[in-house]
Amino acid sequence: MFVEIGLLGLILLLLCIWAGIQIFQSAAAPLAKALWIVALLIFPVFGFVAWLLFGPRTNR
C-alpha cells in the first residue's frame, strides 16, 4: 500500500516540476508566473489541474 502512495507522490512531484518549468518558460507576465508557482507550491494537485485547464497556452 505504501509503495502505491509513494509512487503517486513521485508522479505528482514530477508533474509539478514539469509544470513549473513550463510556467517559467511561458511568455506570461511575471506576476502571473509567480501566482501559478505559488498555486503549485501551496495546492500541488489542485494547482496542477488548474494550470492544465486555465494556464497559459502555447501556440504550436
Image: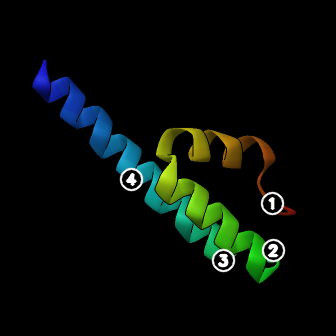
Q: Mark 4: few, some, or many residues within 10 Å (few <14, many ≥20)?
A: few
Q: Quadrant of residue 9?
A: top left
Instruction: Name the amino acid, label 3.
Output: Gln
Q: Position of residue 44 (x, y in %)?
A: 48, 47
**Could you give the CA–CA distance between mark 3 and mark 4, rounded to whole angstroms?**
17 Å
CB-based contact (under 8 Å), mark 4 and mark 2? no
Nearer the N terminus, badge 1 or badge 3?
Answer: 3
- Judged from the image, the secondary structure of the residue bearing numbered disc 1 is loop
- Judged from the image, the secondary structure of the residue bearing numbered disc 3 is helix
In the rendered image, the vertical position of residue 7 relative to residue 15, given as above or below:
above
CB-based contact (under 8 Å), mark 1 and mark 3? no
Instruction: Name the amino acid, label 1.
Output: Pro
- Residue 14 horizontal side relative to residue 32, left or right: left
Instruction: Name the amino acid, label 2.
Output: Ala
Which residue position holds label 4?
A: 14
Which residue position holds label 3?
A: 25
Which label sits on residue 56? 1
- Residue 52 horizontal side relative to residue 29, left or right: left
Q: Which residue is drawn at 28% across and 45% down?
A: 10
Q: Which of 60 and 3 is in front in this view?
A: 3
**Could you give the CA–CA distance between mark 1 and mark 2, rounded to whole angstroms?**
7 Å
Q: Which quarter of the image is occupied by the N terminus?
A: top left
Instruction: Name the amino acid, label 4.
Output: Leu
Q: In which quarter of the image is residue 17?
A: bottom left
Q: Residue at x 87, y 63 (%)?
A: 59
In the rendered image, the vertical position of residue 37 relative to residue 54, given as above or below:
below
Which residue position holds label 2?
A: 28
Q: Position of residue 28 (x, y in %)?
A: 81, 74
Q: Which of marks 4 and 2 is in front?
A: 2
- Residue 9 horizontal side relative to residue 4, left or right: right
